[in-house]
Amino acid sequence: MTPTPDLIIFVLLAALAIASAAMTLASRQAVYSALFLVFNFLVIAVLFLLLHAPFIALIQITVYAGAIMVLFLFVIMLMGLQRLDTESKLKWQAPSAVLLALILVGTLVYAFVREPGAAAALLPPLQSGFGSPAQVGEVLFNQYLVPFEITSVLLLVAMVGAIFLSTFKRKSSE
Amino acid sequence: MNVPTIYVIGLSAILFALGVTGVLVRRNVIVIFMSIELMLNAANLAFIAFAREAGSMAGQVFVFFVIAVAAAEVAVGLALIVAIHRSRGTIDIDEISSLHG
C-alpha cells in the first residue's frame, strides 16, 4: 500500500499518542505524568477531528484535557502528592506486567485482524454534517434521551459523593 | 482522514495495553488513576473509528456518555484519594494494605 498523505498524518499522530502515553507511565513525577496525559488527550482529540467527530473532539478538549486534568493537577499540587514511587517489594511484578501487556496487544490485534473485511482500504463517504453538534444533539435527544437523563442523575450523585467524601473527616473530628 | 479502520483500532489496542501496564506497574495511586483514563480514551477512540466506518452517530453519542461517566468517576475517585491521603498520610498502594491477610 502506497503511503497516502492521510496515512502519513495518521502514523505521525499515532506515534505522538503512543510516545506521550508511554511517557505518562515512565515519568517519575506525577505532575509530568499529568502533563503528558494532557498532550495525549489533545492528540486523540485531533484524531477524533480527522475521523469526522468535531463535536466529540471539542468535548474531549474542554472536558478531558480541560476540566478533568485540571482536577488532577489541583489534587497533585495542593496535596503535595508528586513524590516518587518507592522501590517495590515485588521485583517480578514490572517485567511480568509488561509481558502480559504485550500478550494483550497481540491478542487484541489478532482478534481484529481476523475479522472479515478488516483490511478494507477505503471508507465509504459520509453525508455532510456528520458528527456536527446538530446531529449529535438530534440523536442524543431522540434516541438516547433516557440514558442522557440517567447521566445527569449520575453527575449529581458524583457531585454529592465528592463533597461528602471531602468534608467527612473534618466533621467527624469536631 | 481516510485510513483503514483496522489501523485506528490497532492504535486503540496499543493505548489500552499501555494503560493496563500503568495500572500494573506504577504504585502512585494518582498515576494508576491516570492510566485508567488512558484506557477509557483508547475505548473512545475505537468507538469513534467504528462510528466513522458504519456512518452511524450512535458511536459518537456513546463516547459522549463515556466522557460524562469519566468526569463523575474522576470527581469521586480524587475525593477518595484525598480522603485516603488525609487519614493515612500516603497514596502509595504498597503501604495502603490494611486488608492484607
Image (cartoon, helix red, strand yellow):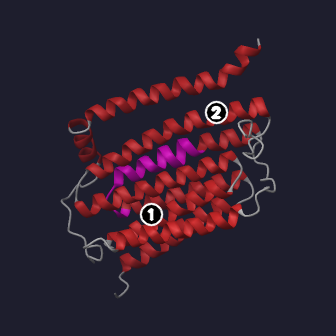
Q: Specify the label residue A60 is tagged with.
A: none
- What x and y, as percent, mark residue A67? 54, 41
Residue beneath label 1, please? B12
- Give yes or no for residue A8 being in the magenta stretch: no
Look at mark 2 in the image and give the residue it sits on. Answer: B80
Q: Is residue A87 above or below residue B33?
A: below
A42 left or right of A93?
left
Residue appearing at x 66%, y 50% in the figure:
B31
Q: Chain of mark 1?
A: B
Q: Which residues are magenta?
A: A50-69
The amino acid beneath tag 2 is Leu
Q: From this viewpoint, is residue B1 visible?
A: no
Question: Residue B63: x, y in percent?
Answer: 37, 48
Horizontal and vertical percent position of residue B19: 56, 58
Q: Quadrant of residue A72?
A: top right
Query: Is residue A52 part of the magenta span, yes or no?
Result: yes
Q: Nearer the viewer, residue A122 or A108?
A: A108
